[in-house]
Every structure is written in C-alpha cells, then in structure tokens.
Image: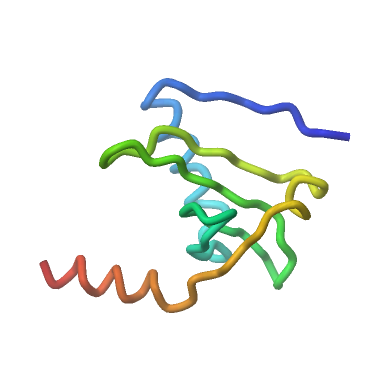
C-alpha cells in the first residue's frame, strides 16, 4: 500500500510541519545524500523510518519530499554524512 502524498505550498504550513518534525524526530535525524541530493534520514535504533529529500532553488528550499513507506524507502540510495553536520554547526557558530 502506497502512502498518499501531502503537498504543502504555504511557507507557514511548511514551517509548522518542520517544527513538529524537529520536536519528534530530531534525536534520530542525520544529514545524508539521498539519490545524490541533500536530505535527512531518520532511523530510530538503526531502523530507517523516514527520509526527507530537499529540492533547492537558489538559496531556498523549494520542495521537501518526505518518504515513509517501505517500498519507496527501499528504492533510495542513501549515504549518511557522519560528522558533517557537527562541522557545519561549528563553522556557523564561529561566524
């Protein structure tokens, strides 16, 4: 069974959903390349549960594709970028 896609186009709606996600999934979220694009993977206790793929246009996120259904998750090519998020955070803090 394929999950139905939900499309959010309003910036406020996207921000609200991002806040909800950050409160619920962030301890397990890791920066990753997903099919060669920037994304996040959520894998509580090492079990892949969710992938967020970001489409970037200029300096803005134009689209976020949230994948939670197993058949689509199994099709993704994922490379977790361990340590990169910490390095980026340190660099931003020093500015």
Which quarter of the picture shows residue 85? bottom left
Which residue appears at 70% of the width and 72% of the height? 45
> Farthest residue in the front direction?
36
Residue 25 image position (x, y, % from top left): 57, 55
User: How far across and how far down the image is residue 84, in percent?
Assistant: 39, 73
- Classify 27 as above or below 21: below
Q: Residue furthest right?
A: 1
Viewed as shown, does residue 41 lie left or right of 13?
Answer: right
Write down the quadrant of residue 47 in the picture: bottom right
The answer to whether 70 is drawn above or below residue 82 in the figure is: above
Which residue: 29% across, 69% down? 89
Colour convention: rainbow
| Left or right: 86 in relation to 27 | left
Residue nearest the observer in this picture, 45 or 50: 50
Which quadrant holds the N terminus?
top right
Q: How many numbered discs, if any?
A: 0
- Residue at x-position 27% and y-position 38%: 58
Percent across and percent down for residue 63 are 46, 34
Counting from the top left corner in percent of width and height, residue 95 is at 11, 66
**Nearest to the observer: residue 82 or residue 57:** 57
Q: Check the image and name the residue furthest to the top.
A: 10
Nearest to the observer: residue 67 or residue 43: 67
Q: Which residue corresponds to the image point at 53% horizontal and 56% vertical from the top-left?
A: 36
């Amino acid at each position: 069974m394929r999950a139905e896609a939900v499309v959010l186009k309003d910036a406020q709606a996207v921000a609200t959903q991002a806040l909800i996600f950050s409160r619920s999934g962030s301890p397990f979220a890791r920066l990753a390349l997903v099919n060669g694009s920037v994304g996040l993977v959520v894998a509580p206790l090492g079990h892949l549960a969710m992938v967020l793929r970001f489409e970037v246009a200029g300096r803005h996120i134009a689209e976020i594709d949230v994948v939670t259904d197993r058949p689509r998750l199994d099709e993704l090519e994922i490379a977790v970028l361990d340590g990169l998020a910490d390095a980026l955070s340190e660099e931003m803090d020093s500015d």
